[in-house]
Structures are given as C-alpha cells and as structure tokens.
Amino acid sequence: MKQGNGQPTVYRVSQLGPVKQALRDDYLRARGEGTGKQYLAAVQHIYQRLRQDPHGFGEPKFNLPAMQMVVHVAIHRPLVVVFGIHEKEPLVVIRSVRYLD
C-alpha cells in the first residue's frame, strides 16, 4: 500500500456502467438461490480491497499504456472481478464482474 504523509492511500473505485447492472442482476440471482448474504459480503470485501490495497489483490494480466493502467483479475468467491489500476492516480476502475456458478 502506498503511503502519503504517513497516511495510507485510499483509492477511488469506480465501475463501468454495465458493472452496476451486473452486480444488481447477480445479487437478485444469488438472493433467489439463498446466498444473497454471502454475495453481498463478497462485494463488500472486493470493494474494501480495491480501496485499500488493489496492487495486492488478484493478478496483473496486461497493461493499457494509453490509459496508464494495469489490468488485474481477482477471484473472491462467488465473484471474478477484472479491474484496472491507474499508474499515477489513486484510481481503480472495475471493468467487469462475473458471478461463478
């Protein structure tokens, strides 16, 4: 985790438009299957990791030089999340989230 003035860096997390809808749809599916609480706990864990330590979460897969981002893939059951970490700003962008069956 990067430090700034003795304080840990908190990353701003945003998501592409389809991610919000996918999270809603998948939550409804999980709730219907009786696993809604576990699903929400996984989402909360993922967002916490992305805000506090995105570089330590998942595996780096490729660079997007024009956007100055490194794209990572992480699994926190029941979700797979693909996200980019900006190389210079404390910013994480969630590109996709997939619900594992």
Image (cartoon, grey):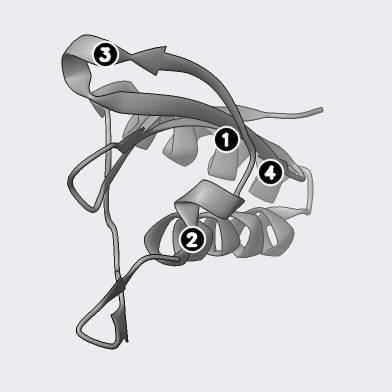
Mark number for residue 65?
Answer: 3
The residue wearing badge 1 is: 26
Vertical comparison of 46 with 66: above or below: below
Distance, label 1 to label 3, CA atoms, is 31 Å
Q: Is residue 96 visible?
A: no
Q: Quadrant of residue 75?
A: top right
The residue wearing badge 4 is: 30
Give the mark nearest the N terminus, 4 or 2. 4
- Residue 71, image x and y in percent? 45, 25
- Categorize mark 4 by other alpha carbons within 10 Å: few (<14), some (14-19), many (20+): some
Vertical comparison of 35 with 16: above or below: below
Mark number for residue 89?
Answer: none
The residue wearing badge 2 is: 53
Distance, label 1 to label 4, CA atoms, is 6 Å
Question: Which numbered disc, 4 or 2, marks the residue closer to the eye?
Answer: 2
Distance, label 3 to label 4, CA atoms, is 36 Å
Q: Secondary structure at mark 2?
A: loop
Q: Are marks 1 and 3 in contact (CB under 8 Å)?
A: no
